[in-house]
Amino acid sequence: MSMAGNLRKVTALGAVGGLRKVARLTRRRARVDLSHPARSPLGSAVVNCVAYQDGARVPGGRDLVDTVERIRKSDEGFVWLGLHEPTAREFAGIAELFDLHPLAVEDAVEAHQRPKLERYGETLFAVFKTVCYVEHKELTATSEVVDTGEIMVFVGHDFVITVRHGRHGSLGPLREELEADSFQLSKGPAAVLHAIADHVVDDYVNVTDSLQEDIDQVEAHVFAENGARADAGRIYQLKRELLELKRAVVPLARPVQELATRPIRVVDPEIQAYFRDVSDHLLRVTEQIAAFDELLNSILQAHLAQVTVAQNEDMRKITAWAAVIAVPTMVCGVYGMNFDNMPELHWRFGYPIVIGVISLACLVLYRGFRRNGWL
């Protein structure tokens, strides 16, 4: 029986006997810790389950129900449960155990949500879009530059549940940093929520800095001597990837602003000052993305202008050569009409003189076009 099926048997947190029975059943299924990027994603969706009291990690097993039981008996501390791409069946028991709203549970399982902040009774539900810069040797028209994922966070009085979707965005290093800062961790679940938001926004900053290098490279290529031959597909690709980043960053501004300014029961007022700092960083990233978008538009317009200028130059060269070739074509056309009575038709020097006149006229036209920059 799956962990979710076992957890459905929990009907009341006060029923200690029922909790212990579920704990025995959940031990039958092995869990794999996904907090480290090198570890396999096979096994249970549960990444980690840790209890904290007074800013310190509480020693003990990783069994979910036993951990929740200990924390709620002592009425101190909180539980941090980490999940990676759980199924609806796996999450059902957890939702019942922590009394999570069905709509929030559905969003956490299905993913593909916009960044948002919602309150369901005493529980706060936040959605963050994670981003990762995809390294590449050379930017092409098909290069993937930004990879996105999601982190959903349930915050209650005595618990934090993080649900991660995607190949990146591991919270293992973040957990270690928080555990090293007992003062911050002692402020409760809101401190974890702030740390996640700060971690996500810091990734935004890193990605925008990396995108700056790609944009500078494309800009230098466009304004080089052969800029008209630059690949416009690379510019469009950067704009598409920038749009993906924009969809992750811009909608997050309002949720972070609410966390920083509006009174929320599960968020300590001291933590709101930290959210204001996150909001400032997010504003910087948003402005940088807008600047990148405008810059890419300018680069694209400059490239199209260079292509138009190059085409005009080619047309001028073609027109100039056509004018030069028109002289012998016209003369030869006249003398090719085969009339009997034509000037100098039977003269001994007629042919070389005509050839000389044609050559001189072509030379004069060539020098004139060359002087005017058409050739």
Image: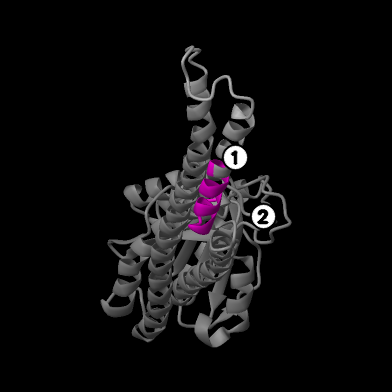
Is residue 367 part of the magenta span, yes or no? yes
| Amino acid type for the residue under numbered disc 1 | Ser
Residue 313 x %, y %: 49, 50
Find residue 257 and report its horizontal and vertical position in percent. Answer: 31, 74
Residue 219 visible? The answer is yes
Give the amino acid type for the residue marked by disc 2 in the picture.
Glu
Residue 234 visible, this angle: no
Q: How many marks?
A: 2
- Label 2: which secondary element: loop
Residue 138, disc: 2
Mark 1 or mark 2, earlier in chain: 2
User: What's the mark number on residue 203?
Assistant: none
By secondary structure, the bulk of the magenta-drawn segment is best described as helix
Residue under pointer 1: 359
Residue 220, x across and y down, in percent: 57, 65
Closer to the eye: label 1 or 2? 1
